Amino acid sequence: MKFRTEVEIKESKKKIEVEDKIFSIGSCFASEMSDLFQQGQLQTVNNPFGTIFNPFSINNSIKKLHDSEFYKEEDLIAFSDEYISLDHHTSFDTRYIHQTLNKINANIVEGNHFLQDANWVIVTYGTSFIYEFIPKQKLVANCHKIPQKFFEKRLLSQQELTDSIYDTILNLKDICKDDVQILFTVSPVRHTKDGMVENQLSKSKLITAVHDIISQFENCHYLPVYEILMDDLRDYRFYKEDMIHPNNQAVNYIFDTFGNAYFSEETKDFIKENFKINKALAHRSDDEKDPKYIEFKEKLNQRIEAQRQKVKHKIFNSYEL
């Protein structure tokens, strides 16, 4: 007898190998998944523009990365003693215009170079809502806590959504490797500030638009992450205290479900061992000269070196044997 409805991710014929490069962009849930890729010591770049939620802004970011288009002084605005880009997350804001530009353009260089060798791209949409900055009549990715009176909020139309997703795919197929696999998903994080009914409408529009477009491309797939949390893990014990964001248990469950469908056996073993090593690295001793602790460190060094021998890229970079 089953006591819950399980949502499965269809097994992929093409698998993620230990040397593959994974690019991810989108909502904060994309960052959580990318963090697990990094802990597993896979090659990944996440959100060169910072956390972005809507398909229009994500498409704008991909196009900028594709064209390697640098930002200039006139692309920024000054607010609250900081220089900001309305295309970027607040983490790029600084007090000095050249510092903001340097942070932005350095990420464009890194993102452009990484995308050219990317084997996998994961795009996570969070909302269909978008804000227009009235003074410049510009659709923005982030409001940067600028007063609400300067913005007009609306839902992207279905045509705007499908056009954005379609253009994103074309740009990715052009800059990435010929056999790049593009995985689309909708974030399970509910945007409750929009309203519960409005959030559901927003998510529904995203899911419909994604399915309308990816059916036209062989290398594009939908990951039912939203459905896993809504229908499989439909219990508040899988949420953080805010009752909105999935907790670590839920994120790890989704990651494992994704890995079972997309990781090769070699990649599964590689990541599993690296997760164990990360836990061991967190262990500290009050007496570093304790023979047992020295033995523990020596064995850990051997495990890390054995993992390093399995790949060409550098792993555990911050750890010196």
Image (spheres, helix red, strand yellow):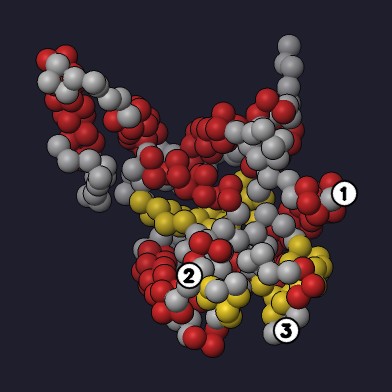
Q: Say the numbered circle drawn on residue 197.
A: 1
Q: In the picture, residue 161 is in which quadrant?
A: bottom right
Judging by the rendered image, the residue that carries numbered circle 2 is 94
The furthest residue to the front: 81
- Residue depth check, mark 2 versus mark 3: number of the one nearer the observer: 2
Does 250 sit above or below residue 198? above
Q: Residue at x 73, y 27 (%)?
A: 235
Give the residue type that dot 2 points to. Thr
Judging by the rendered image, the residue that carries numbered circle 3 is 135
Q: In the picture, residue 299 is in which quadrant?
A: top left
Q: Position of residue 22 (x, y in %)?
A: 43, 53
Question: Earlier along the polypeptide chain: callout 3 or callout 1?
Answer: 3
Q: Residue at x 32, y 49 (%)?
A: 19
Assess whether mark 2 and mark 1 are in contact (beta carbons under 8 angstroms): no
> Quick one: quadrant of the N terminus?
top right
Assess whether mark 1 and mark 3 are in contact (beta carbons under 8 angstroms): no
Give the residue type that dot 1 points to. Val
For this view, does 132 lie left or right of residue 246? Answer: right
Q: Say the numbered circle drawn on residue 290.
A: none
Assess whether mark 3 and mark 2 are in contact (beta carbons under 8 angstroms): no
Q: Is residue 106 among what the camera can see?
A: yes
Comparing 2 with 280, the one in front is 280
SS assignment at label 3: loop
Q: Position of residue 44 (x, y in %)?
A: 40, 53
SS assignment at label 1: helix
Q: Position of residue 26 (x, y in %)?
A: 58, 57
Give the residue type that dot 3 points to. Pro
Q: Position of residue 155 (x, y in %)?
A: 81, 65
Q: CA distance from mark 1 to mark 2?
A: 36 Å
How many marks the image carries: the answer is: 3
